Amino acid sequence: MAEELGLRERKKRDTMWRIYRTALDLFAERGFDKVSVQEIADASDVSKMTVFNYFGSKEDLVFHPMEEHFRDAARAVRDRLPGESAADAVRRQFLEMVEARDASIGLHSEPIFLKVRKVVSETGALMERAFLASRRGTREMADLLAEETGDPMLAMVAAVALTAARNALVEEHYRRLAVGESPEAIAADAVERARHAFGLVENGLKGYAVKA
């Protein structure tokens, strides 16, 4: 029974990734708005209902595997160690992701991740969804810090600054990836870039929100 369940789960996972990759190929080739869900289903050799069983909406065909990463920095702040500041926590998490060559920060050679960036950047509705998801992540971090410090205004300043520094580093990774640099080459000086980027923020936030 366990073996049958394992096989069933693998088949479901394989089907999901086949639909996802097929959709991104079509979106990248023809544009998000010019591809229907039925066309994705036909190209994936599944029914339209099956597509919606795996992905709740057409936009989810782009965002489903990545949207949770908009909350990464907020999670770093929430789970930071005693004696660790908010800036230290976000930097530490980012460097751990560099070490792991995490695809969500642009350190993976798989072409599909560049396709995601291309499709999102060329589609207004997807850009708006990405912006709103990022803003929710920033708001979550600000709420955490406001609860701890009692100052919502400074909490928002800190959350926006930390998010901006992190986003700038990720954008730099994707820029270099897009012109042909390897993840290894990009990662080689990522620690130094992160030190400078978060250092700019930390100079203004030094001593702010150090966890008791």
Image (spheres, rainbow, N blue to C red):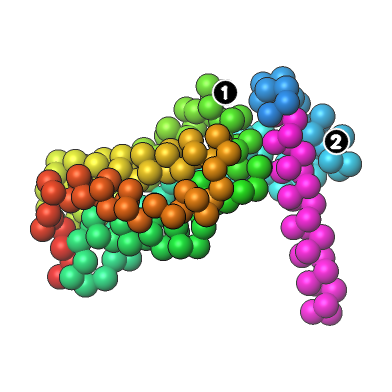
Does residue 178 appear left or right of residue 137 in this picture? right
Prevailing secondary structure of the magenta residues: helix
Does residue 203 appear left or right of residue 172 in this picture? left
Residue occupied by mark 2 = 43
Does residue 161 appear left or right of residue 34 in this picture? left
Residue occupied by mark 1 = 122
Residue 114 screen position, x and y as percent: 60, 38
Q: Is residue 71 magenta?
A: no
Q: Is residue 110 visible?
A: yes
Q: Write down the region rendered in magenta.
A: 1-27
Q: Which mark is residue 78?
A: none
| Quadrant of res 91 | bottom left
Residue visible at 61% across and 48% down in the picture: 109
Q: Nearer the viewer, mark 1 or mark 2?
A: 1
Quadrant of image for the N terminus? bottom right
Task: Name the one closer to the observer, 9 or 171.
Answer: 171
Label 1 Cα neighbours within 10 Å, binned few <14 / some 14-19 / many ≥20: some
Task: Name the one closer to the observer, 80 or 170.
Answer: 170
Up the image or down, 141 lies above or below 40; here it is: below
Residue visible at 33% across and 48% down in the picture: 193
Q: Earlier in the sequence, mark 1 or mark 2?
A: 2
